[in-house]
Image (cartoon, rainbow, N blue to C red):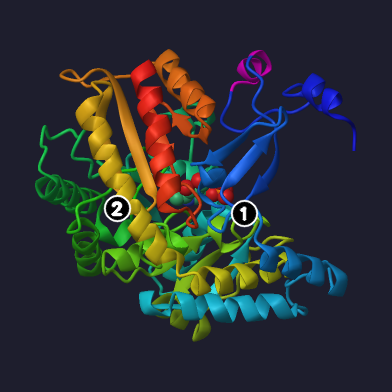
């Protein structure tokens, strides 16, 4: 390992960063994080902060979870890699698939297909959805519907169902046959409505309308996050996802629940779909499945889809899709230890309790800071929408956002800024004192803005 001077000297030079302009990164070198313990991280200058970002919505168990580290070390000793392509497999992947099916059984899931991360899981779900319809003899069902503001990763399929213009424009043309409906956001929506239940109803009506326009028999699936994350922490009214399920059922369209953020307790429920009492046809997971200790994801396949593939007599049932690292034994060993710890510590309950405290702290910040346009939260997913003008809802600019982040960091809390949103997704192990510390740092940051 080279020394700290080398790292600082080369920061943002030989490397391009995701979701950033290379020139901007060179001009404003990112913080180099060198250590982590519990919910805290330490940067290369030796400054320790509470990580209210949780890595990237993923380090649910914090940075020093011994059982995960031990499981990884043990598996590296036993077998660092073997493939799951036809003819071979490995033991941890079988065991983790079993555990994931148990975990998501209440959501109607029956099988797991392993991937290397969230984008892969989304890609897999989209592809399996099309294949499902070919198996069923309805090969015209190829289109996908999705929510504006939805985030589904950056592969071409995921970017195509993605509902954020900034992730689409530079890579167009994207996949044809993808259509978007408005997100159920009571703060900003095309209907001029503020009542969350009414907004949910209007968005669901838009879905119904789009299905009628496209023709239900051309649509493979609708994909949504149960709580929208990267698009600005949009928490739908509780009626939305059940109504979506009812509409899709009526038209025979599959529902893919993108649980890459919401899965494993972050919303206060063990899955986002379960939070709303909905059973999807497929679910995509990644991130917290290993608490970020190893890149791993999975597409969970529900009963109906599994049954169609497994009883297939057509020529379409064989899966022509997969990754070298599908079912990576080290990742799966990490996943097994993560799930066991997640369950043992009842992280869903802590997410709900700490999330309620964080939510009321955010409401207080909204009452005392003009720059706060809206606060949105569910469990330990939270967002603060910053505005330059509250009445006009003018989005806060980059200078404001940078200032808030800088002051919060000086108050020992790492927050994430995305557009005019402050995004909070701390580890699910945080304490009530940690929540108070996050609120205090935000108070200082918002005052400075
Ligand atoms: C809901 C959702 N889906 C998919 C992805 C893509 O996951 P990854 O970055 O692991 O490819 C993300 C990433 O943040 C996400 O939030």
Q: Quadrant of the C terminus?
A: top left
Q: Earlier in the sequence, mark 2 or mark 1?
A: 1
Side (left or right) of 70 relative to 365: right
Whether residue 157 sits left or right of residue 391 in the image: it is right
Q: 317 left or right of 324?
A: left
**Which label lies toward us, 2 or 1?**
2
Image disc number at residue 292: 1
Residue at which label 2 appears: 356
Say which quarter of the image contains residue 319: bottom right
Q: Which residue is drawn at 34% across and 52% down?
A: 355
- Residue shown at the point (56%, 64%) measured from the top left: 298
- The reply to whether the magenta stretch includes residue 148 is no
Q: Main secondary structure of the magenta part?
A: helix
- Mark 2, other Cα within 10 Å: few <14 / some 14–19 / many ≥20: some
Q: In this view, does 259 lie above or below 417?
A: below
Residue 175's place in the image compared with 81, above or below, is: above
Magenta residue span:
21-27
Query: Which residue is rendered at x = 66% and y = 80% of the image?
Result: 94
Q: Position of residue 77 (x, y in %)?
A: 87, 70
Quarter of image, res 330? bottom right
Indicate if the residue with disc 2 has its beta carbon within 8 Å of ligand 1. no
Q: Residue furthest front?
A: 433
């Amino acid at each position: 390992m080279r020394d700290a001077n080398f790292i600082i000297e080369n920061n943002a030079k030989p490397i391009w960063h995701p979701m950033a302009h290379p020139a901007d990164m060179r001009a404003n070198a990112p913080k180099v994080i060198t250590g982590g313990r519990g919910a805290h991280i330490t940067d290369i200058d030796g400054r320790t902060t509470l990580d209210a970002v949780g890595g990237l919505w993923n380090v649910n168990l914090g940075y020093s979870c011994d059982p995960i580290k031990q499981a990884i070390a043990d598996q590296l000793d036993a077998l660092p890699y073997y493939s799951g392509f036809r003819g071979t497999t490995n033991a941890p992947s079988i065991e983790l698939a079993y555990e994931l099916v148990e975990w998501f059984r209440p959501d109607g899931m029956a099988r797991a297909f392993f991937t290397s991360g969230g984008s892969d899981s989304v890609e897999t779900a989209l592809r399996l959805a099309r294949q499902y319809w070919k198996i069923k003899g309805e090969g015209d069902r190829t289109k996908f519907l999705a929510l504006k503001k939805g985030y589904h990763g950056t592969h071409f399929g995921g970017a195509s169902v993605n509902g954020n213009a900034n992730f689409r424009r530079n890579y167009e043309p994207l996949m044809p046959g993808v259509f978007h409906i408005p997100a159920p956001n009571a703060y900003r929506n095309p209907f001029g409505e503020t009542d969350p239940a009414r907004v949910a109803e209007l968005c669901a009506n838009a879905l119904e309308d789009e299905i009628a326009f496209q023709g239900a028999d051309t649509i493979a699936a609708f994909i949504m996050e149960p709580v929208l994350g990267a698009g600005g922490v949009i928490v739908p009214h509780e009626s939305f996802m059940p109504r979506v399920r009812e509409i899709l059922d009526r038209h025979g369209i599959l529902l893919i629940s993108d649980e890459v953020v919401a899965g494993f307790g972050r919303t206060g429920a063990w899955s986002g779909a379960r939070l709303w009492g909905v059973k999807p046809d497929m679910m995509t997971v990644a991130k917290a499945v290993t608490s970020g200790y190893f890149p791993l994801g999975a597409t969970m396949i529900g009963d109906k889809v599994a049954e169609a593939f497994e009883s297939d007599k057509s020529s379409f049932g064989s899966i022509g899709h997969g990754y070298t690292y599908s079912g990576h034994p080290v990742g799966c060993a990490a996943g097994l230890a993560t799930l066991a710890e997640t369950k043992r510590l009842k992280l869903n309950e802590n997410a709900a309790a700490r999330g309620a405290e964080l939510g009321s702290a955010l409401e207080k910040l909204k009452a005392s800071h003009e720059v706060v346009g809206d606060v949105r939260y569910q469990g330990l997913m939270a967002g603060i929408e910053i505005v330059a003008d509250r009445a006009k809802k003018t989005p806060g600019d980059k200078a404001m956002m940078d200032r808030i982040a800088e002051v919060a960091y000086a108050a020992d809390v790492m927050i994430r800024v995305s557009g005019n949103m402050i995004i909070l997704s701390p580890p699910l192990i945080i304490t009530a004192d940690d929540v108070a510390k996050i609120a205090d740092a935000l108070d200082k940051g918002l005052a400075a803005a």
